[in-house]
Amino acid sequence: MFKPNLLKSYCIAIALSALPFLIQAQAPAKLKPNWQNLDLPADSTFGISTEKAYTELLKGKKSIPVLVAVIDGGVDINHEDLKSVIWTNPHEKAGNNKDDDKNGYIDDIHGWDFIGGPKGDIHFENLEATRIVRQLKPKYENVTASTVSAADKAEYEVYTRAKADYDEQLTSAQKSLQLYTGIKGALDSIVAAMPKDAAPLAFFESYTPTSTMQTRVKTVVVRNLKIDPDFEKFRKAAIDAGYTHFYEVVNYHLNLSFAPRDIVGDNISDPTQHFYGNADVDGPDADHGTHVSGIIGAIRDNNIGVKGVADNVRIMSVRTVPNGDERDKDVANAIRYAAANGARVINMSFGKGYSPDKKEVDDAVKFAISKDVLIVHAAGNDNKNLDAADVFNYPNRTYADHSGSASNWIEVGASGPKDDESLKASFSNYGKTSVDVFAPGVLINSTIPDSKYAEFSGTSMASPVVAGLAALIRSYYPKLSAAQVKEAILRSVVPVNHDIAIRDGQNMKKVPFSDLCVTGGVVNTYNALKIAATM
């Protein structure tokens, strides 16, 4: 799963007396509200000109509601800025414990949860590499490249890559958890001595450390509080979030003994099984999916919260992505469910490095294409070139059987607000042939559970910008096919004609933006709607 930046954009890792640590280097730049929908010439912000389109092109025009499936970790269907656009299955009666529409899913009123079951809902999961190591280690731990059979060679290569990834990630995460445990302990011991009514900056400046770690912590905290005096904000974002993240990685994502699938109650060894799960479309952690949904279709005219790209959508929540890696079986079923139940656009803001049952996902994608669905997928947050032979990112549009690739698929990288060498988000994956377009994905303000709002960064945020644009086109030009909608989006990008700075290992280099994606540009609502009107 592509998680939003847990440590926020203003925190960076540095060496402090040979100890990696987090500091606030500078106050984050304050972006214009709704920046992703603003216009570059008019607002000096590289948004996608959505507001301009509504003002100049769509005023007085009629539209139809378009169903967008959000395959994610769950959606808060009662959020103040979303509840009126949540899809309600017209053929299902709530609470009667019957499959009224005969689609195989009981009481699927607002979507479906493929990672839940009679026993509850999965929250945390392993990474796919962990699952592969657990499954294949007994078979291959004493096998070498020279002794593996020809029949097992492909599987053995997957295992060795997964094992190397697993070992590297576990070692790194354990060290980071140990570090954060020490930092958190030192900070907590200082805070325990702070009077309730004390001003944090004054207290930390006057505090006499009792250990080397406390001295380092004091230095960093004072430096941060001089920039932003909100101590709780700093502690939550820079310390608590880091500790929590690495705790989850060590104890859930990379824990070979942790296997929560029994909660679902399906036959996990059968990737063709379709009917399992429950109707809980929120789940235990709906932050990510709710944020994605708001970018697509948060109510635009209620004078609260944020503005989605599309003004006449219905959001279907298909809960598939845990805190950890999603399973191919669930992704395939989620795509099938969305397409079979009327979705016209599917947003998929998730990804991983392995796909043991890719054929099942490919078959589901083909089914969706047969239903004229447009699939929009986030390119990932590893700052890697997806064209490279040694970079793996799933799901993707290339079919495993080498029969071709999915036509109705848009792969999206993340861009920032400035039309300069920093336009590509520093974290965003890219690829001249693998990524189609870029869209805003830096500090996007959107909906999160309990009718709250937050800024997240990631290609997870860029993908729903494009999904929202696709839904907007299908809403005002419903006769256009998914292929035509994709064509309109790709043909209408704002081209970027200057070089972009990219970190390559420890070095920075500059490359043309045309080397980063197929179209060489950032999507644009105004231009896309003008093209759609002529198709």
Image (cartoon, helix red, strand yellow):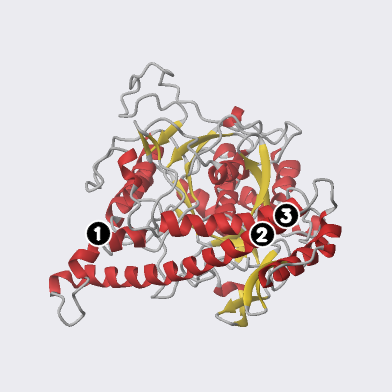
Q: Type of residue at label 2?
A: Ala
Left or right of 317? Residue 129 is left
In the displayed structure, does residue 172 sit left or right of residue 417? left
Identify the mark at residue 308; answer none if there is no mark: none
Q: Would you identify the image quadrant in which residue 499 lies?
A: bottom right
Residue extending furthest toward the front: 210
- Residue 355, given in percent of the width and then of the height, sits at 33, 59
- Identify residue type, mark 1: Gln
Residue nearest the observer in this picture, 7 or 316: 7
Residue 415 in view: no
Among numbered discs 1 and 2, the one appearing first in the sequence = 1
Element class at badge 3: helix
Q: Which residue is mark 2?
A: 238
Residue assigned mark 1 = 135
Name the spot of residue 421 as percent of width and height, x first. 69, 73
Give the CA separation, mark 2 to mark 3.
Answer: 15 Å
Q: Circle 3 is placed at which residue position?
A: 191
Determine contact: label 1, label 3, CB under 8 Å: no
Mark 1 neighbour class, 10 Å CA radius: few under 14, some 14 to 19, many 20 or more: few
